[in-house]
Image: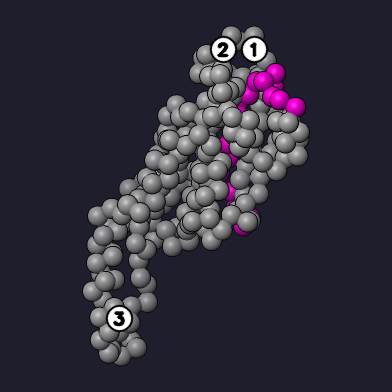
Amino acid sequence: MAVGIKGLLRASILLFSPITLGWSLPAAAVPVNIPPLMTAGEMLTQLNQRLVHSKNSAATLHYWCQQQLNGADDLQIVQESTRPQTPPADIYQKLQIPEQTPLRYLKQRFIHQGKVIAVFDYWYRPDMLTAKMQQALAEQHTALVSIARQADFYRLSLGNTPRWPEQGAMPPFVLEHEAVIYRSDSKPFSLIQEHYSQQLLPRAQQLNPY
């Protein structure tokens, strides 16, 4: 695991602390607040790098929950499929498809232990859904990007926007990604806009981000 300079300094403090060296000190001398080995920014940078290369961002998020949030068993998906306005023109431009192409909107929220850790917005082509994909989507338990990946579709990142500050309070959403999901024949299927919240950070990094 890559650890930045702050993380290395924290690790060195722990390594050469009196507790590690086995010195006998009064109980009052034992440090109560041990800082986390990685800052929030370092952890989010690591997640960001994984997402840039991910063909299935929901699977990457699931793995993150397993590694950083004490398991992914509590991860749930809540989805809504209605949105009043028509697709913005830039959606068609990013998908590189004609504006008369029918698109459908879908929002999926990823909830872990009662907290929203990510929100995915999709504009997708319903005519490219296979019967199996339609059935999986109707069950409302699986991320569309994962359903597409199971059908040999793949995700390619268009760009990412880190939103965490170098100091001060963390904003509600700390990272944004935009990507296109393609069918195996490289035909664009969906634009996906991903918003990752500060709740995907472990509790230690939320309390002490820096």
Q: Is residue 175 magenta?
A: no
Judged left or right of residue 124, residue 176 is left
Neighbour tally class for label 2: few under 14, some 14-19, many 20 plus, Cα within 10 Å = few
Give the SS element for disc 2. Answer: loop
Q: Which residue bears the numbered disc 2?
A: 97
Amino acid type for the residue under numbered disc 1? Thr
Above-or-below relation of 97 to 105:
above
Sequence-first disc among 1 and 3: 3
In this view, the residue in front, 142 or 32, is 142
Residue 32, percent from left and from top: 37, 77
C-alpha separation, residue under disc 2 versus residue under disc 3: 62 Å
Residue 100 seen in render: yes
Q: Which residue bears the numbered disc 3?
A: 19
Residue 90 seen in render: no
Amino acid type for the residue under numbered disc 3? Ile
Amino acid type for the residue under numbered disc 2? Ile
Residue 24, percent from left and from top: 27, 90
Q: Residue at x 28, y 53 (%)?
A: 4
Give the SS element for disc 1. Answer: loop
Judged left or right of residue 186, residue 161 is left
Tell me whether circle 2 and circle 1 mark residues in contact (CB < 8 Å).
yes
Give the SS element for disc 3. Answer: helix
C-alpha separation, residue under disc 2 versus residue under disc 1: 7 Å
Q: Quadrant of residue 13?
A: bottom left
In this view, the residue in front, 61 or 114, is 61
Q: Which residue bears the numbered disc 1?
A: 101
Q: Is residue 127 magenta?
A: yes
Residue 150, percent from left and from top: 62, 35
**Quadrant of the image containing the C terminus:** bottom left
From which residue to which does the magenta span run? Answer: 113-131
